[in-house]
Image (cartoon, rainbow, N blue to C red):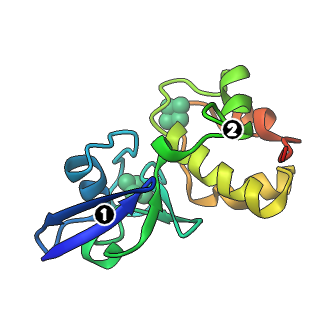
């Protein structure tokens, strides 16, 4: 089936198998490898992307379902050509180990900041309920992000 998906402002078109997942389209058709594949069952959040500004686990969606939609992946996240507030907070406090989960945390954290204006502990815990980190025990991530505010 022929699909066209706008990813980070650029249209990608391909003839794909109906069973191709969105994450495979992003990685293998668009060649954007920052969106990771962890569980492929919707549990880990490593494959998180934004669709029309809202977080979606791209392993749970088919590429054909995303036809015509606008998607933002980790490669499209940032501010003024540099890192945004969430990326700055996570990298400056080194709140990661293997970093496999980090792109998902940045994508979802960026959405949470946009929605709430500030990342309180409650907002962080609620927003990241679908993101798994096997290394950090979460405390360094919560500590890094707690109090981050949106700077316009
Ligand atoms: S790979 Fe999609 S939720 Fe784990
Ligand atoms: S830093 Fe390794 S899974 Fe999160």
Q: Which mark is residue 144?
A: none
Say which label, 2 or 1, has the lower sequence index. 1
Residue 67 location, x and y as percent?
31, 75
Task: Identify the residue at horizontal 59%, vertical 27% (top origin).
Answer: 96
Front in this rendered view, residue 105 or 97: 105
- Determine if residue 134 is in view: no
The residue positioned 70% from the left and 36% from the top of the image is 141
For marks 2 and 1, give the CA distance: 25 Å
Q: Locate the N terminus by quadrant.
A: bottom left
In the rendered image, the vertical position of residue 20 relative to residue 8, given as above or below: below
Instruction: Specify the quadrant of the image occupied by residue 61.
Output: bottom left
Q: Quadrant of residue 81?
A: top right
Count of labels shown?
2
Is the residue under label 1 in contact with that under label 2 (CB below 8 Å)? no
- Looking at the rendered structure, the secondary structure element under dot 2 is loop
Q: Residue at x 20, y 48 (%)?
A: 28
Query: To which residue does mark 2 refer?
Result: 84
Q: Residues within 10 Å of mark 2 (few under 14, many from 20)?
A: some
Q: Position of residue 110 (x, y in %)?
A: 67, 50
**Is 66 situated left or right of 48 in this image?**
left
Q: Position of residue 8 (x, y in %)?
A: 45, 53
Residue 48 vertical placement versus 77 (above, below): below
Provide the secondary structure element on which disc 1 rests.
Answer: helix
Which residue in the protein does label 1 denote? 22
Q: Nearer the viewer, mark 2 or mark 1?
A: 2
The answer to whether residue 20 of the structure is visible from this angle is yes
In percent of width and height, residue 152 lies at: 84, 47
Locate residue 2 relative to residue 80 in the image: left or right.
left
Would you say the beta carbon of the disc 2 residue lies within 8 angstroms of ligand 2?
no
């Amino acid at each position: 089936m022929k699909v066209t998906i706008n990813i980070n402002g650029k249209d990608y078109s391909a003839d794909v198998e109906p069973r191709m997942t969105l994450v495979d389209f992003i990685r293998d058709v668009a060649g954007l490898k920052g969106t990771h594949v962890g569980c492929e069952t919707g549990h880990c959040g490593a494959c998180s992307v934004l669709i029309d500004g809202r977080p979606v686990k791209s392993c749970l969606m088919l590429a054909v379902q995303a036809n015509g939609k606008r998607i933002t992946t980790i490669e499209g996240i940032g501010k003024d050509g540099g890192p945004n507030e969430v990326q700055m907070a996570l990298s400056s406090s080194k709140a990661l180990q293997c970093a496999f989960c980090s792109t998902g945390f940045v994508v979802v954290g960026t959405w949470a900041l946009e929605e709430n204006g500030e990342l309180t502990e409650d907002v962080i815990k609620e927003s990241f309920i679908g993101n798994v980190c096997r290394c950090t025990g979460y405390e360094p991530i919560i500590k890094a992000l707690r109090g981050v505010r949106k700077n316009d």
